[in-house]
Amino acid sequence: MALQYGLGSSYNGFYFSTLRLFHEGVARPLNCASRGGVPSFALGARMRHRLAVLAFAIASILLLSPRANADTYLFDFTAYIVPETGSPGTENIQFDLTAATLPASGDVTSFTSVTGPFGTVSDFQWNSAASAFCEGSSSGGNGCAGFLSTGLGAYSTYFPAGSFLTTGTFDGGDASLVITDLTTAPEPSAPVLLALGLIGLGATRLARRWLLLSDHLQKAF
């Protein structure tokens, strides 16, 4: 491979300095051809290989970096209940649920917090579908939520159909259900940041060398 300038022997010094720059790893990945005495450049096999490796490294880091594959939701249910016998009272039930997407219905038996005058709560159900059943009861066209306790037995209250499909506060008249997403977006780990920094540094150096070579050739013509 050689550069043909067509300008005489006075350019020998520039010729050899450019070759040295090539052999230092700047221009060797390039295919150099001469058309009408003016060099033209195209990406060669080594340059394509380097760019492919760079793209593969970036894609691998993005794919392998830790990502949250499930969210944790807090369910906070509060109901003001007037039983057929006994005193009225407010029951509050809270529990966490981890899932890839917010479930439209469910049945849980473990709770983070239960407060109220109606004994031990052993079960909680919710369902966003119209005419759904919760603790054995339903109301035409409505979704529902309810619980089972030792002091009250089965209790159900009703919400508009389509409730509980997103986070937020849902009002059922004498009861409410608040759903909150507790998951925060994970920050990139230190190794991922370091690898991205090194890749960026390598790409910057490669681009800087190419610009240096282009500027060097432009000054010669």
Image: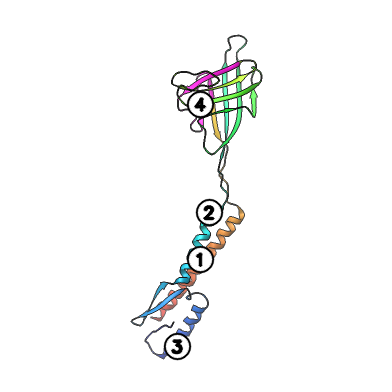
Nearer the observer, 205 or 40: 40
Tell me the mark number nearer the camera, choosing from 1 and 4. 4
What stretch of residues is rendered in magenta? 153-176
Please give the name of the residue rendered at 44% of the width and 77% of the height, measured from the top-left corner. 216
Classed neighbour count for the residue bearing mark 3: other residues with Cα under 10 Å, few (<14), some (14–19), many (≥20): few
Rendered position, 68 above or below 125: below
Quarter the C terminus occupies: bottom left
Residue for badge 3: 12
**Magenta highlight on residue 52:** no
Task: Report the amino acid beneath label 4.
Answer: Asn
Q: Secondary structure at mark 2?
A: helix
Rendered position, 43 above or below 60: below
Q: 78 left or right of 3? A: right
Res. 127 mark: 4
Tell me the mark number nearer the camera, choosing from 2 and 4. 4
Res. 204 mark: 1
Instruction: Measure the alpha-carbon separation of dots 3 and 1.
Output: 30 Å
Instruction: Measure the alpha-carbon separation of dots 1 and 2.
Output: 20 Å
Classed neighbour count for the residue bearing mark 1: other residues with Cα under 10 Å, few (<14), some (14–19), many (≥20): few
Quarter the N terminus occupies: bottom left
Q: Position of residue 87 (x, y in %)?
A: 62, 11
